[in-house]
Amino acid sequence: MSTESAVMPGAVDPPAPQANDRRRRVRKDRAGYLFLLPWFIGMLFTVVPFFASLYLAFTDYNLLNAPKWIGLENFADMFRDPVLLKSLQVTFVYTFVSVPLSLAAALGVAMILNRGIRGLPWYRAVFYLPSLLGASVAVVLLWRYVFGFDGIVNAFLGWFGVDAISWTSDPDYALTTLIILHIWTFGSPMVIFLAGLRQIPTMYYEAAAVDGASKWRRFRSITLPLLSPIIFFNLIQSLIASFQTFTQGFVMNNGGGGPANSTLFYNLYLYQQGFGQFNMGYASAMAWTLLVIIAVFTAITFLSAKYWVNYDN
Amino acid sequence: MSTTLPTPRAAKKPDEDADVLIERFGSTRKSRFSRHVILCVIGLVMMYPLLWLVSSSLKPNDLIFSDLSLWPADWNPANYAEGWTALEYDFGVYFSNSIVIVVLSIIGNLFSCSLAAYGFARLNFTGRKLFFALMLGTMMLPGHVLLIPQYILFAKLGWLNTYYPLLVPNFLATNAFYIFLMVQFMRSLPQELDDAARIDGCGPFRTFWSIILPLCRPAFATTAIFTFISVWNEFFGPLLYLTDPELYTVPLALRQFIDSEGQSQWGQMFAMSVLSLAPIIGFFIAGQKYLVKGIATTGLK
């Protein structure tokens, strides 16, 4: 992301007579556009649906009849839809609990790993592997049984005298199991943190240690500021991904979002509205609302960046 | 690992003033040991569910939840044979469906993203910066916004219940992450290569094919591995577009194990879960180097 403004190396036009210049320009343009041809066609599959869904958000459309313009009614309905508000709440709780926790775990483990440890590739592999599996149906299924009434989590808690908990069927706990699943996948931000920590010159720490800075002080004054662009990047990525969680909620309770809608993620409800009940207009309005929510949170993160993200290293 | 330079360690100096330094570099035996203990405990906790999955896939059903030890007291490898044929079609069908989709997706991504990346990274044409910004913008765009119109479009094209909705976008460079990854890689190659090729009379296509492509193998490997993992895991697309069980991919098939209420063939389900995860773990082990490099440069998940 930080590279988007970087100057791209490309052939620079040598000085030439004007007509020649234009001909070369046309030839270059043609070559460039030919290379981008698949991408241009692909963009049609992106740009057209982007605006089409904005239009559909203001219509009543069930796939069979033509879309009927109803103005802001879909959005008004959303405010009155308790299930929608519940799904928004589920998604918010999930995001704002699991994203900070998993990033903290990622940073903590990355810092332990960064200190020149033997067997680093092994540890990194073990911590990273779950993040590749976390979204797979097999692992979400596994999670249902690990947190099942007779599962290993309850057996483990039983050693400490904790009564068995109905993790997956109690509305108070069902989302917790998915938050734990999210934290389990801290490996991919961890690898990014690890790459970032390597960039911090060790001499900073040496100088700070000579000056008598405590461990905590060194973390606050060296590690955090110098790592802040990477924390920022991980935060944006995780927020955007987390707002769109689907598979975990779908598989955990077999498409229903239960118990008592406690795992009804926003996108799962969108799917139910769009493809269960074919309320395509309503689902489009939901999609755009989530887009705006994501954009707002991304913008807040970007605006806050100037107070905590350090770019001048 | 060629990508990981070990952090320089402080020399083991018997210098008392330097103990803060030594602690930072983990050279005291005690702190090194305690770090290994912490990491091993975290690692074990994280791996335990997966180990339990493998062990349960080999246990008879009545032992799975009563005997929690990882080493089965009673072995039942028949779970694999029975699970393979437990659903409407046997898992050979689902696995070959998944493999077809994965292989074609990899080919499509490598083909279309490398073309686009070369255009962005090495060619100069009108509007390049604008298009590049647009491409980066689509990287951040949540896919669900496009979902409904795309579904309607694919329905109108008669593509429901076919693999086209899952495959065609990959041939049209719609995955901006891979373009970005390849652009980053191509920019790191010296510009003199292109200049030399041009002086020798190579056009852009020849330069792309004979000079740049062979040098981009590491970026292609990263793209292929990431495509493999994400497409193999992909659940939402197949769920939306495939309704005929004969076309199901492995994740859709696995989900059928819980469709029937009160199913109790856990051993079979776990056996098939293990088989569905095995290729990812295999690719992960084979391509760890590329994966780590890939997410470190683009933040891809």
Image (cartoon, rainbow, N blue to C red):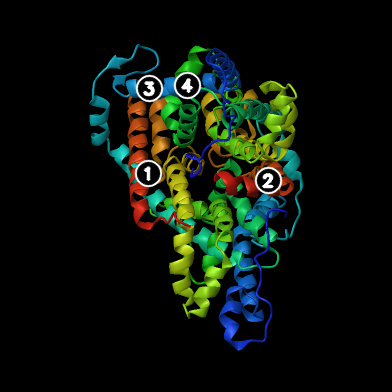
Kindly identify which chain the residue marked by label 4 belongs to: B
Q: Could you tell me if residue B92 is visible in this image?
A: no
Kindly identify which chain the residue marked by label 2 belongs to: B
Which three-letter amino acid code belongs to the residue tagged 4?
Answer: Tyr
| In contact (CB < 8 Å): disc 4 and disc 3 | no
**CA distance separating discs 4 and 3:** 14 Å
Instruction: Decide: is B192 above or below A60.
Output: below
| In contact (CB < 8 Å): disc 2 and disc 4 | no
Which three-letter amino acid code belongs to the residue tagged 3?
Answer: Phe
Residue A56 is drawn in which quadrant? top left
Badge 1 element:
helix
Callout 1 and callout 2 share a chain: no
The residue carrying mark 4 is B151
Please give the name of the residue rendered at 55% of the width and 65% of the height, measured from the top-left corner.
A111
**CA distance separating discs 1 and 3:** 21 Å
Please give the name of the residue rendered at 65% of the width and 77% of the height, measured from the top-left corner.
B27
Q: Residues within 10 Å of mark 4 (few under 14, many from 20)?
A: some
Which three-letter amino acid code belongs to the residue tagged 2?
Answer: Tyr
**CA distance separating discs 1 and 2:** 29 Å
Badge 2 element:
helix
Q: Position of residue A166 (x, y in %)?
A: 46, 55
The residue carrying mark 2 is B290
Q: Position of residue B300 (x, y in %)?
A: 56, 43
Residue B237 is drawn in which quadrant? top right
Residue placed most toward the observer, B295 or B46: B295
Residue placed most toward the observer, A79 or B6: B6
Any mark on residue A298, and which? 1
Kindly identify which chain the residue marked by label 1 belongs to: A
Residue placed most toward the observer, B107 or A290: B107
The residue carrying mark 3 is A51
